[in-house]
Amino acid sequence: MADFIDRAILIGTGLEKKLKELVKELEESGKGEEGEEGELPGGKKLENKVVDEGVKAVKDLLTVLREGKEKFEKELLCSTESLADKLNVATMSELDVVKEMARVAREKVDGLEKRVKTLEGKKKAK
């Protein structure tokens, strides 16, 4: 399942990268050489309009892809949290509390071991 999700994310990000490259290429090709009075010839105007529409369509597609990716990530997070809850898996914050408790307990044990050694040393000295 995780492999499928990884592939889906990679496909989405790869598609997004390719579309960004296409937008850049379309924008660059839309920059035509201007005529005498700053106007483009009729064919170039039409070509630029087509390129502008293509750029707009690709940008819209990128927006939809980005929104879809965010929605997918939210759904995935919700599903995994639900699954972890059903399986009664500890959360990171709960694990941090247990780690802290273990650290405190270890410190107490170390202190008690030192006290025992001291008391045993006093007992042998008598």
Image (cartoon, rainbow, N blue to C red):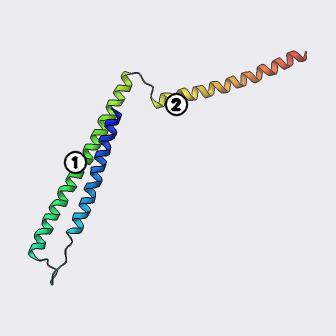
Return the x and y of residue 36 as percentages of the image width and height: 15, 84
- Circle 1 crowding by C-alpha within 10 Å: few under 14, some 14–19, many from 20: few
Residue that carries the numbered disc 1 in the rendered image: 64
Identity of the residue furthest to the bottom in this view: 36
The residue depicted at 13 percent of the width and 66 percent of the height is 49
Check the image and report above or below for 103 versus 32.
above
Q: Nearer the viewer, mark 1 or mark 2?
A: 1
The residue depicted at 27 percent of the width and 55 percent of the height is 18
Check the image and report above or below for 11 versus 59.
above
The quarter of the rendered structure image containing the N terminus is: top left
Using the numbered discs, state the Cα–Cα distance from disc 1 to disc 2 in whole angstroms: 38 Å
The quarter of the rendered structure image containing the C terminus is: top right
- Circle 2 crowding by C-alpha within 10 Å: few under 14, some 14–19, many from 20: few
Identity of the residue furthest to the left in this view: 42
Return the x and y of residue 25 as percentages of the image width and height: 24, 64
Residue that carries the numbered disc 2 in the rendered image: 96
Identity of the residue furthest to the right in this view: 126
Residue type indicated by callout 2: Asp
Left or right: where 42 falls relative to 98: left
Q: Badges 1 and 2: C-beta atoms under 8 Å apart?
A: no
Left or right: where 94 falls relative to 80: right
Question: Foreground: 69 or 111?
Answer: 69
Return the x and y of residue 37 as percentages of the image width and height: 15, 83
Residue 26 circle label: none
Question: Quarter-wise, where is residue 19 in the image?
Answer: bottom left
Question: Quarter-wise, where is residue 55 in the image?
Answer: bottom left
- Pointer 1 or 2: first along the chain: 1
Helix, strand or loop at disc 2? helix
Residue type indicated by callout 1: Val
Check the image and report above or below for 52 versus 85.
below
Question: Foreground: 104 or 39?
Answer: 39
